[in-house]
Image (spheres, grey):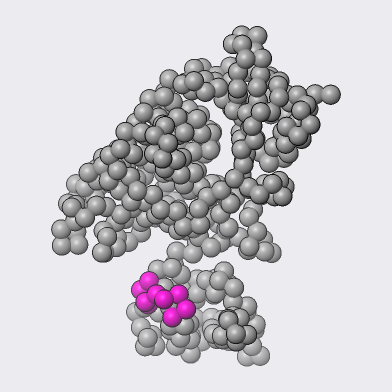
Amino acid sequence: MADNSEQTKAVSLESVRRYLQLHGWQETPTKTNTTSLFTLAVDGGERLEVPLATRRDFGGAERLIADALRTLGQLAGRDAPQIIDDINSIAFDRIRSILPDELVRSDSIDLNIASGFIANAKRLITTTATVELGPSAFFGRVTKDALAYADRCRFGHTFRGSFGFTIESPVVRNDEPSLSVVPEVAPFERRVVQRLVRGLSNIRLAEHSENPGVIAENYQTGFNANMCDALIELVEKTNDRLKIEVAWSPEWIPAPDVLAAPTFEMKPSTIELVRDAAISLRRVETARPYTINGTVIRLKSEHNPADLLDVSSPREIVVQWNSADYGQLNVKVTLPPSDYIIAVEAHKTGRVICVTGMLERINRSWILSSPGNVQLQP
């Protein structure tokens, strides 16, 4: 890569430095203060070295950036444009949608398909943000904060081969001492994309079990009716088939219950399940406040039992409750990790647990949403 090339000018010096830091390179200032030396331990005990200018107006800055890009590209197996794109996107979670081949002609698609796709993609992320701000089975309209979030997202480049679009969701810089620790509370923008991924994972589980209830019963952490409607409209614009991939920004470690590099495929049978789930969610009985008490008959967690103090994501329990109004019910409750520990103790000892929340019915399932005041009875 030549000095002062257009490719080196396509990245900022700070972005290259941050990319190196997030991928394990250790920075050591040099005596001149015009450069820093980045080192990385590799197999066999060897160490790679990449010098980088500390400011752009240093005479050799462009050459050092070019050398760094070349080294990073070789390590990652990426060409120059690809590694530059990776560096420029470190502050974004990327949602990549791949369109079916029959919509592509000479590496292009019809303008009406493109414009409709972009509008529906924005609707999906806006509804997802609204649900993340206040989980509900369905809502009347999106919130101003959700619209503001969508406006901060970027429309990334299209890509050839398999034609598609990239939506980039911004994440704030992680200034915690350790970049390898899952945060107790992830930034809002990251939580939005994690909700989208959880919802798509539930759709895949619903396909495997041929049960749309898997989607509807998990709206507290995944898709609600509005999100289902938005996904349906998005996929309908692509002949009912679409592939969605998500790439996480290295700034923040994703929660352990979402996949490291999730990929999902939508097809006509998928959309029918999502449509059924949306109908079920809109039939949810009006929630009423209740305090339920009973034995914990099921614990559901994707985590290692030894990791109960991991506060990155909620867990589900089922409480058998003898209700004066409805008789004996098995009620699903999604608890934060601190309360889940109480439920584990109740399950282990056979003691009765009390939880306050909003009781609602989805199809044949009873769910206590917005749980609080979790206690063990003597």
Residue 208: image location, x then y, percent: 41, 40
**Closer-to-camera residue (340/82):** 340
Q: Point out residue 73 in the picture as x, y percentages from the top left corner.
A: 43, 78
Does residue 197 appear anywhere in the picture? yes
Residue 80 drawn in magenta: yes
Q: Vertical placement of 134 versus 125: above or below?
A: above
Nearest to the observer: residue 212 or residue 188? 212
Mark count = 0
Residue 267: percent from left, percent from top: 29, 43
Q: Residue furthest left?
A: 105
Reply above or below: 357 against 40. Answer: above
In the rendered image, residue 337 lying in the magenta stretch gets the answer no
Name the residue rendered at 69%, 37% in the picture: 340
Q: Residue furthest right?
A: 378
Taking the spot 76% from the left edge, 34% from the top edge, the residue there is 348
Q: Is residue 17 above or below residue 367?
A: below
- Which residue does the image show at 65% across and 25% down from the upper left? 319
The residue segment tinted magenta is 74-82
Quadrant that contains the C terminus: top right
Describe residue 116's horizontal placement relative to residue 204 as left or right.
left
Q: Which of the image's four quarters has the N terminus? A: bottom left
Residue 110 as seen in the image, left or right of residue 136: left
Q: Give the residue displayed 63% in from the left and 62% down from the top.
A: 180
Could you tell me residue 98's position as x and y percent?
30, 54
Q: Main secondary structure of the magenta part?
A: helix
Q: Residue furthest top?
A: 325
Q: Is residue 33 visible?
A: no
